Amino acid sequence: MKTLFTCLMLCMGVTLFAQTARLQVIHNSPTPTVDVYVNGDLLLDNFAYRTATPYIDVPSGVELNIGVALGNSVSVDDVLVNFPVTLEEGETYVAVAAGIVGGDPGFNLFVNNMGAETADDPANVGISFFHGSPDAPEVDVLANGGVLFDNTAFGAFAGYANVPASQYNLWVTPSEDNATIVAAYSADFSWWAGNTAVVFASGYLSGDFPAFEPWVALSNGGTFPLPATAIPDLTSKVQIVHNSPDPAATTVDIYVGGDLLLDDFAYRAATPFVDVPVGTPVSVAIAPSTSTSVDDAIATYDLTFEAGKRYIAVANGLLGADPAFNVDVFDMGREQGVNPELFDLAFLHGSPDAPAVDIDARDVGTLVANIAYSEFRGYTSLAPKAYNLDIKPAGTNTIVTTLLADVSGLEGQAGIAIASGFLGSDPAFAVIVVLADGTVVTLTESQLARVQVIHNSPTPTVDIYANDGLFVNDLAYRNATPFVTVPAGVELDLGIALSNSQSADEALANFPVTLANGGTYVVIANGIVGGDPAFNLEIFDMGRETASETGNVDLLFFHGSPDAPTVDITTGGNVLYDDVSYGGFSGYLSVPAASYILDVTPGDDNSTVVASYQADFSWWVGNTAVVFASGNLSGDFPAFQPYVALSTGGTYPLPVANGFDAADNFRATAIGVQNNAFKVFPNPATTNIQIQMDLEKEEDVQLSILNAAGQSIRSFQFGTLAKGFQSLDIDVSDLNAGLYLLKVDTAAGSQTQLLTIGK
């Protein structure tokens, strides 16, 4: 491209000594690249949108016919529009091409005859503003909060503002309304001291292409866009909540600045967030509902609100009593959640006679710890679903009440939970949740039950669904869940599906159940899928999680062996459980936490012991367990075996009592270990044990040590051992005192025994 100066000199046929002016040209019309002709000759070739020339010398005192053509034009004959311009000698001009070719507003050349190339001070920068956005209204431009350019409409220039060369926050507002910021940008001119620049609005505010954006044209011809920043909030808002339980203040009138804001404002009512003045004290007065003016106020508070903050003001306390009536103010309120997929919940303790409390969400953890009266706590983000909130005196495990907080569908919103009312009188204690729009919801008491599920059907591992949601994943045969909390008072459709199922639609069997609020249940999957007796869920509705007496253990018995007859369970000749048939429960017995020999006899013949097992519950003091008969007495796989399900969910088999080999011999040979079982010496042990076994054939042998919850804590690989007698030494000195399970695995199967560690 020819230099501008040379082109103009040739075009006009003038000498270097002719009269001149200074000119900068800026292309701000949202059209393609253009060519610019002056008096028939090409001045600017392929002049791009949002670019500029530097200031150059141009002829003055003569008419310049400036023609604009599309880029890559071949001659002045391709010009779309012409502009005759006469410049004055010694003047400095900025010419901006703006508007829409063939549109509205039309394409035009806007010329400012008050251009400048240098600032008025070497430490300053001179900034001019040109409004070149075709669909934007008249605007003001603010710099760091002060008006820099006032009432500038499309096609107009604002004169130079000489300001210190620094970084500025530029805010665009409607003219005459500087409190409403429609856009914000960062402008760094700290490096341009002594020079000038033109800030020009460019593009479409509507979002059409090209989109709105402010650009800068430097006096040397460089251009760049200004980066957008977050629009600052210059407003302040407050939400008012009436939470004073004083009978004399059931409804109140609230005055702000002497004017009535809320008439007959009821207890446990709330406003949405409303605008309040910023930076000056605002008088908030509380008056009886019968008031006729602010002069009837019973309490007045002067509050000053900061720009950008959201306040929650809560009337608490008692008139003429302790704790005194007050307005507690939280200055970190939110009108919406921080994450659009979560619900944000803050907390206020507003119950005058309630102690400090902890609030726990079941299956989540502690939401608030040790919150005292009139204390606020900031927001916690929650997934949008139902939560059971346990309210406890701070630092204790005592649940005073459990409340249902269902925040489903509230994603992206915010609210505050407020403890309200009295523990010991009316209005009664409650927890209300106030949403940002002023909606108030009183939380209801949760309808809950506790359930343990035991898998005792000789089928593959299963998944359990409750009302289409996955309740238990991959529950294996002879395993159990701990006691868990489930909804009560509503029908639960329990579906049993094979493991790795994808949805409740794959359930093999469904069982509708309705549990009572506060009930504790033991549910046992039993029977044979597609066989006889049929698969079923057996439900015991008087479950226990703790022993009924200190120092005891409470044991429930379930008969779950499909081919076993009615039996009695005795110990030392005393009947513990009488005439228990298949599918039946025998209620809890509370017995001292000790070790017992449990004998199994026919239901009508306690003199004939058909099986005997060792049951050591000395370590399970204060807790409960279910002893359940499992497997087939006939010897079919899985073979008969009594199991224990602890209330924590751990399970283990009861070992055959020493010296008894009548009904259980088939178990030993099934896993390749002869003589009924492997032997452990000593038992109880402290530091070392010796395991002895007689292998029927050469076997790969693995030993696992399981804790009371059924979790493997140590594992030993002995490799291939020869047929016959084997003795294995194991170091157990690192185990804590308690009961453990030893499990021996071979290719043929597995066998277990209890191990007691004493220290």
Image (cartoon, grey):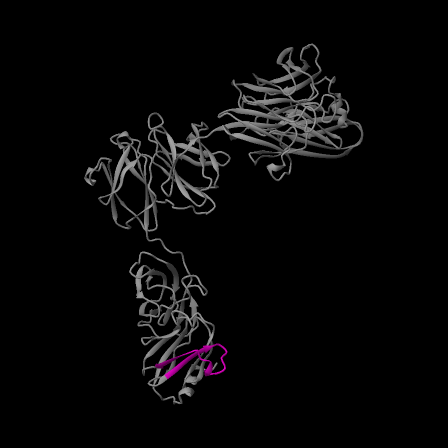
Q: Does residue 112 sit above or below 645 in this rendering?
A: below
- Residue 571, given in percent of the width and then of the height, sits at 64, 13
Q: Name the quadrant containing residue 396.
A: top left
Q: Can residue 595 be seen by looking at this rendering?
A: yes
In the image, 719 versus 194, the foreground residue is 194
Q: Is 146 placed left or right of 493 in the picture?
A: left
- Residue 467, given in percent of the width and then of the height, sits at 55, 34
In the image, 621 versus 368, the foreground residue is 368
Q: How many marks?
A: 0
- Residue 263, given in percent of the width and then of the height, sits at 26, 39
Q: Can residue 673 be seen by looking at this rendering?
A: no
Is 420 included in the stretch rendered in magenta?
no
Q: Does residue 103 sit above or below 467 in this rendering?
A: below
Q: Name the quadrant containing residue 692.
A: top right
In the image, 483 versus 262, the foreground residue is 262
- Provide the residue span drawn in magenta: 64-85
- Residue 527, given in percent of the width and then of the height, sits at 66, 25
What quarter of the picture does the C terminus occupy?
top right
Q: Is 678 placed left or right of 31 in the picture?
A: right
